Image (tube, rainbow, N blue to C red):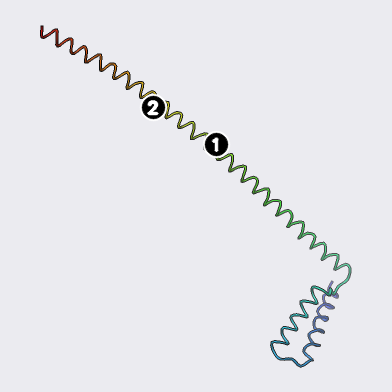
Amino acid sequence: MSTQKGSMESGATRKRMKLEGKERTGDEAESQVVLVQEEGFETNPIGSEEMELNISLVLEKIENFTQRVSEFLESGKTMFKELCNEFEEKLIMIHKEQVDKWQEEIKELRALDASNEEANALLQNARYVLQLSRND
């Protein structure tokens, strides 16, 4: 690998030397050096078949990892949607149960109030009857 790295470095240096040998103005020369370096890396691979195989394996790992991350994201979204729906249903059910309890409590209070009113009316009648009997 170190010999391959050395050959890649010498190739890049060779390209830079050729460009620097020609007369160019500052920014133009720098942009040409960067352009040649980028193009050399992307379009003209300098390496053996073994290196290319290793690179393709790494790229495949990247693709597989990206795919797994994408699947995890989709799985997570689905899980959160399901949890959200379950949470919403449970919360609605709890609310309904509590409202039903309170409505039952209101019915009991109304029944108690009606019973108290009835008892109060009987007591009022009894007082009236007692007052009439005392007055007689």
Residue shown at 21%/15% (left/top)?
A: 124
Residue shown at 65%/48% (left/top)?
A: 76
**Relative to 12, is 133 above or below?**
above
Q: Nearer the viewer, mark 1 or mark 2?
A: 2
* The image quarter in which residue 115 lies: top left
The front one of 91 and 65 is: 91
- SS of the residue at dot 1? helix
Q: Which residue is mark 1?
A: 90
Residue shown at 49%/31% (left/top)?
A: 97
Q: Could you tell me if the residues under marks 1 and 2 are in contact, i.e. CB atoms within 8 Å?
A: no
Sequence-wise, the earlier of marks 1 and 2 is 1
| Residue furthest bottom in the image | 23
- SS of the residue at dot 2? helix
Q: Position of residue 16 (x, y in %)?
A: 78, 85
Q: Which residue is mark 2?
A: 106
> Does 20 sit left or right of 52 as displayed?
left
The front one of 114 and 64 is: 114
Q: Position of residue 7 (x, y in %)?
A: 85, 78
The front one of 65 and 95 is: 95
The amino acid marked with disc number 2 is Ile
The amino acid marked with disc number 1 is Lys
* The image quarter in which residue 9 lies: bottom right
**Relative to 3, is 118 above or below?**
above
Q: Position of residue 127 (x, y in %)?
A: 18, 13
> Does 44 sit left or right of 76 as displayed?
right
The 10 Å Cα crowd at callout 1, few under 14, some 14 to 19, many 20 or more, is few
| Residue furthest right in the image | 49
**Relative to 134, is 97 above or below?**
below
**Relative to 73, is 118 above or below?**
above
The 10 Å Cα crowd at callout 2, few under 14, some 14 to 19, many 20 or more, is few
